[in-house]
Amino acid sequence: MFRSLVVLAGLLIWSLLASPQTTEKPECGKIESVRGPAVVIRDRKVADAKAGDVLRVNDVVQTGAGARMRITLMDGSTLSFGARGELRVIQSDTTAQITLIEMLHGNVRANVKTVTKAGGRFEILTPTARVLAVGTVISVGVPEVETSTSANSAVIDQRTLEDLPLNGRDFRSLLQLEPGIAAGNPNSRSLSDYKNVAGTGVTVEDHYGSVTNFDLNIPGQTDLMPGQYTEIPRGEPPKPPAPMYTPNGFAPGYNDFRQKFFPHFNFDRAENPAPGSRNPDCGRGSIINGVYVPSIGRNDTNKTPIIPQFRTEITGTGISTGNALQVHFYNDSPCPLKFVVTSGAILKPTGFTGRVIEGLILGGEPLKDFQKMYTVGGKVYLKPLVGVAPERNEQPPEDDAEEIATGPREGVALEAAVPAGSETTMMLRSFCVELHKLAPHPKTIYKFADEGDQEKYAPNRALVDRAFHMLLTRQITLPPNLSLDNIVQWMLWAHIEQMNEKRFRDEFIDLVKKNYEAHKQKWDKEAEKRTEQMAQDCWMTVQKVLNPA
C-alpha cells in the first residue's frame, strides 16, 4: 500500500513538472491607440504602451503629461484615458457582464455597453467614489491636489518601480495596492488611503449612472440622469445632481466643474497639440438647442475665436412616438462642431416645408393642431466644411472629442451611428405632450419652444428618466406587445391629462381602434379583447412608474 502511494505521488509530481504551468491573468481588453508617454505594468515589469497591446486583468496603465490612450474592453466598452492618469481593470466578466475598474487619478471617459443581465454592472472605483453605469457615456475626473510625490508628470520606469516600498500608508501607485480592497480595513490599504485626491467629478451623457462614496460607511447615493453631473468629496456623500446644459446654454457652474475635474482632459490643448488636426483659431463651444454657446477659455490662441456658421432644420416623421422628429445639421464653418439637443427639450410646430402633399393642403390644418413634442435629446459631431479633418488619434483632448471622426455612439436617442461630415441627420426620440392633436407630418417644421413651454413641461423629464431607469434596473418589465416607447408615451399622457383608470382605458382603446381603421385592418371582438388586455397591462406598468414603491 505504501509503495503504491509513493508511486502515485511520484506520478503526480512528474505530471506537474511535465505540464506547462501558467499564472497569466485573463485578457480584459486591448489598447486601440496611444499618443505620448504611457506604460503598461504587469508582474512588476514595465513596458511602453503600444497600439495593439493586449491588456490583462490587474495590469496597471499609466499615462504621462500630454498622453492619451483609447482602450477597448472585452465587452465592447471603450475607455478614453487622458493625461497624468493611472488605472487598472480588476474584473472583466463578459458572461456575467461585470466590469470593475480602479482609477487612482486622472480622467477617463467610458462608453459603456448596456448591461442587460441581472447582477451585471460596470463600476469605476476612485479614492472617493464608486461610479456605477448600466450603459452610458460617463466621464470620471480625479484630479490630484498635491503632485510632488506622484507619478503624474512622467510615467514610472523599471528602476522607480523596484524602489517603490510595499508597505506603509503613503503609497504612490496602484502597484502598491492589492486590487479590490474595501475602505475601512485597518490591516489593508485601500484606494481611500490615497490622500492626494480630494474628490471625484462625474458626468453622464445618456442613459443613467449612480454614485456613492468609496467608503460604504458614508451614506448617500446620487442617481445621475442624462446630461447631469455631480461631485463626490472625500469623506462626504455625493452632492446633488446638477444639469450640464440648459436650453439657453451651459448651466451655471458647469464650466467651473469641468475646469476643476477635467483640467487636462478638456483644456490642456497647448501641452501636446496635433499638428494640422484643427484650426487653432476655432473656439470650443457647442451648438446647444440651435444656439452657439462658447466655452470659456478653451480656444488655443489669444485671438478672438472663430464664430462657426451652422444651420439646423427639424421636421416630423409622420408619427407621434419614438423617432417622431429628425434634425438636420449643417456645418458651414472650418471648425469641428458639437451639436447638442438637451434631454427634456420641448419642440413646437412653426411651419411647413411644402403646401401640398398627397392632395392634402397642409395650410388647411392650423399649426396649433399639431402636437408639441418632448425629446430625450442627443448629440452629434461634424467635421469642418473645409480643411483637414482630424484623425481618430489626433483629436483635441476633450472628453468626447474622439467622436468627431466617427459619429456618436448608439444610445437612447439614436437608432444608428451618425456618419461624420459637413452635414448629417439625427433622429430624435420624442413623445407627444398633447393627446388629441396631429402627429408631426414629414413636412412639418419644428423649432425649440419658448421658455414658458419649457418650464411648463419640465417636470415630465423626471418621469421619463425614471421610466428608463426602472426598466434598465429591472424594476419594471415590458408587457407583451408593448414597447418602452409605448409605456413612456402613455405615462406622459396619463400624467399630463390626469387620467384615472377608466379614462386611460377608454383613450387607449379609442386610439388603437383609430390606428386599425387608418391601416384598414379589421376591428372585431378579438381585436377589441386584445386591446383591452393591452390597456390593462399598460395602465399597471404606468402606475409603477408614476407611483414607485
Image: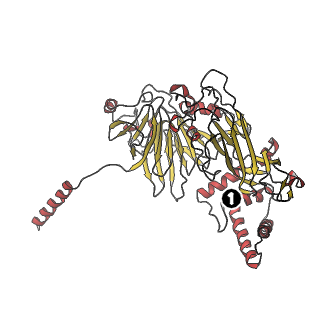
Question: Where on the picture, by quarter, is residue 139?
Answer: top right
Can the viewer see residue 7?
yes
Residue 119 position (above or below residue 109): below
Q: Residues within 10 Å of mark 1 (few under 14, many from 20)?
A: some
The residue pinned by badge 1 equals 485
Q: Specify whether 363 is left or right of 397.
A: right
Residue 539 position (above or below residue 163): below
Q: Position of residue 127 (x, y in %)?
A: 48, 38
Amino acid residing under circle 1: Asp
Q: Position of residue 101 (x, y in %)?
A: 46, 45
Q: Specify whether 97 is left or right of 506.
A: left
Of 314 and 378, the residue lying toward us: 314
Residue 79 position (above or below residue 11): above
Report the colour scheme: secondary structure
Can the viewer see residue 219?
no
* Residue farthest bottom in this picture: 525
Q: Position of residue 84 (x, y in %)?
A: 47, 32
Q: Residue at x 64, y 51 (%)?
A: 414
Q: Residue at x 68, y 63 (%)?
A: 541
Question: Where on the picture, by quarter, is residue 60?
Answer: top left
Q: Specify whether 525 is left or right of 33.
A: right
Q: Quadrant of the C terminus?
A: bottom right
